[in-house]
Image (cartoon, rainbow, N blue to C red):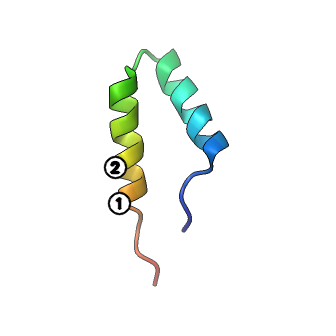
Amino acid sequence: MEGMTGKEIVNLIEKLRSEGMDDTKIIEIILYVEKHEPEKN
């Protein structure tokens, strides 16, 4: 599984901002997701 594309990340940031989430929390979530991808079999 590959990481998110730049466009997907931008879309995610815009969605989370529209729901009132602050940028620091958004970055923490993106970093967590990117670092904890499921292992390939």
Query: Residue 22 location in percent, x, y?
Result: 37, 20
Query: x%, y% of residue 1?
Result: 54, 68
Q: Secondary structure at mark 2?
A: helix
Q: Secondary structure at mark 1?
A: loop
Q: Residues within 10 Å of mark 1 (few under 14, many from 20)?
A: few
Query: What amino acid is at disc 2?
Result: Tyr
Where does the image place residue 2, in percent across and percent down from the top left?
A: 56, 64
Q: Is residue 18 left or right of residue 36?
A: right
Asked whether the beta carbons under mark 2 and mark 1 sit within 8 Å of each other, the answer is yes
As drawn, 9 above or below 34: above
Name the residue: 36% across, 40% down.
29
Report the front residue among 28 and 38.
Answer: 28
Rendered residue at 56%/40% (across/down) = 9
In the image, is 7 to the left or to the right of 19?
Answer: right
Residue type at numbered disc 1 = His
Q: Which mark is residue 36?
A: 1
Q: Which residue is mark 2?
A: 32
Q: Residues within 10 Å of mark 2 (few under 14, many from 20)?
A: few
Mark 2 → mark 1, Cα distance in angstroms: 6 Å
| Residue 37 percent location from the top left of the image | 41, 63
Question: As displayed, is residue 23 above or below residue 4?
Answer: above
